[in-house]
Each structure stands twice: as C-alpha cells, then as structure tokens.
C-alpha cells in the first residue's frame, strides 16, 4: 500500500513541477517545443504545431512523463524491498529500467502522437 501512495504522490509532484515551471511559463513552453518530446512527435507523426494547441500537447506530455517517472521509481523501490544485496539490486534495477522504460515510453508517446495526428486531420 505504501508503494501505491508513493506512486501517487510522486506522480502529483512531477506533474505539478511540469505544470508550474514548464506549461505555465511562456519561455519554458517555447523551449519545450524544441525539446526531444516535441521533435519526436513532430517528425514521426508529421504534426504541425500551428494547427494544434501547444499547451494541451505539453500537458499530455507532462502527464506521460510523470507516469513514466513515477512507475519506474515505484518498480525500483519495490525491487529494493525484495533484494537485499546492493550490487544485485543495482544490476536488476538497471536491467528492469531498460526493459520497462523503453517500451513504456514508446507505447505512451505513440498513443499521444497518433491521437494528435488524427486530431490534426480533423478526426476525433
């Protein structure tokens, strides 16, 4: 139960950080447009940001990043409670991070990209 609470608290904290320091600040939002997430979505899904609401996309990316970070942190802390040897925990945590983080990131960003690709074409 404590891991679920930690996940929720961490999710809220990361999302609030994005909200306060990126989404609500015009300068940070314009820098985010040039960032990796926006560039990835722009090139793979051929998104035109002049037709879409940038704040809404940044909000979805913030939620996605908060989820990914909270989920990975929760998994690593769960592994810490199950594995008592530090070196074994370190190796397993790194392997799990790569095994989970890459597919999780690809799945979430592909959902966001395909959603906005359909929205850009006029299909909801």
Image (cartoon, rainbow, N blue to C red):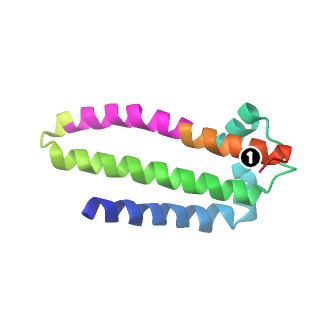
The residue singled out by tag 1 in the image is: 116
Residue drawn at 50 percent across, 55 percent down: 66
Check the image and report above or below for 108 versus 24: above
Residue drawn at 77 percent across, 51 percent down: 124
**Range shown magenta:** 89-106
- Whether residue 64 sits left or right of residue 69 in the image: it is right
Check the image and report above or below for 121 versus 87: below
Q: Quadrant of the N terminus?
A: bottom left
Coordinates of residue 79 in the picture (x, y in percent): 23, 44
Q: Is residue 100 magenta?
A: yes
Q: Which residue is most to the front?
A: 123
Q: Is residue 35 visible?
A: no
Question: Could you tell me what secondary structure mostly forms the magenta stretch?
Answer: helix
Q: Residues within 10 Å of mark 1 (few under 14, many from 20)?
A: many
Q: Is residue 60 magenta?
A: no
* Displayed quadrant of residue 34: top right
């Amino acid at each position: 139960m404590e891991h679920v609470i930690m996940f929720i608290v961490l999710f809220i904290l990361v999302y609030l950080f994005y909200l306060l320091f990126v989404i609500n600040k015009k300068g940070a939002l314009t820098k985010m447009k040039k960032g990796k997430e926006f560039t990835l979505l722009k090139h793979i899904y051929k998104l035109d940001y002049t037709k879409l609401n940038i704040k809404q996309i940044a909000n979805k990316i913030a939620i996605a990043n908060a989820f990914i970070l909270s989920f990975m942190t929760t998994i690593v802390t769960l592994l810490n409670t199950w594995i008592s040897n530090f070196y074994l925990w370190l190796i397993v945590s790194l392997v799990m991070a790569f095994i989970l983080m890459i597919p999780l990131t690809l799945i979430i960003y592909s959902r966001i990209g395909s959603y906005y690709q359909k929205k850009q074409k006029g299909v909801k």
